[in-house]
Image: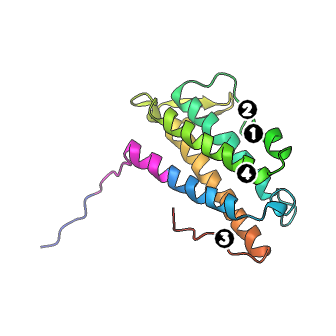
Amino acid sequence: METQPVALEVAVPMQGLLEHWQGHRRLTRRLIEAYPEDQLFTFSVGGMRTFGQLALEMLGMAVPMLREVVGESGQQPTHHQAGSSDAVMHSETPRQELLRQWDESTAQIEELWARIPPGRLQETITAFGQYTAVAYTQLLYVIDNEIHHRGQGYVYMRALGQAPPAFWER
């Protein structure tokens, strides 16, 4: 007797989604840490932005998007503006300042995540006054964007003759 496969919907629990995201953030942090500081805001390939600029974009998206999802948006930067890029660019140790801000945003993500109202991830929201989509897809976009830009950072490090952190160690 042949049985037919049953289609199942798979859902990721809220805590599982947060841990998935934070795993990516831990890996991106390790890449920032390993990246040659003198190349962070100077080296790029093919006219693309530097890894430092990409990391600032990631910072400028994560917490502001999560605030949008929570419903505490207020006045947030657009996804291309990192609210603290001046502090990084004018720091004597830009990488250390970037890492400090990364750690601060990671803590804010944990705090904000606990305030996501029940059912909110299935609601349609307009992020930054211009991007309308279901809330969970907005968060997935931020995660995907980080993965994409981290991949660019991996290519840059390889082009600089250095080995990036193992991508599977999140």
- Color encoding of the figure: rainbow
Q: How much space separates mark 4 and mark 2, taking CA atoms?
A: 23 Å
- Give the residue at x 86% y 43%: 90
Q: Which residue is mark 1?
A: 82
Kind of residue sitting beneath label 4: Gln
- Give the residue at x 77% y 65%: 36
The disc label shown at residue 22, or none: none
Kind of residue sitting beneath label 3: Pro
Q: Which residue is mark 2?
A: 77
Q: How much space separates mark 3 and mark 1, taking CA atoms?
A: 24 Å
User: Which of pointers 4 and 1 indicates the residue nearer the eye?
Assistant: 4
Chain-order first, disc 4 or disc 1? 1
Q: Position of residue 167 (x, y in %)?
A: 57, 68
- Inspect the magenta stretch and tell me whether residue 144 lies in it: no
User: Which of pointers 3 and 2 indicates the residue nearer the eye?
Assistant: 3
Q: How much space separates mark 3 and mark 4, taking CA atoms?
A: 18 Å
Across the whole image, how many numbered discs are drawn on residues?
4
Residue at the extreme front: 92
Kind of residue sitting beneath label 1: Ala
- Inspect the magenta stretch and tell me whether residue 18 lies in it: yes
Q: How much space separates mark 4 and mark 1, taking CA atoms?
A: 16 Å
Q: Which residue is mark 4?
A: 96
Region rendered in magenta: 7-20
User: Which of pointers 4 and 2 indicates the residue nearer the eye?
Assistant: 4
What is the secondary structure assignment of the residue under circle 4? helix
Kind of residue sitting beneath label 2: Pro
Q: Quadrant of the N terminus?
A: bottom left
Q: Which residue is mark 3?
A: 164
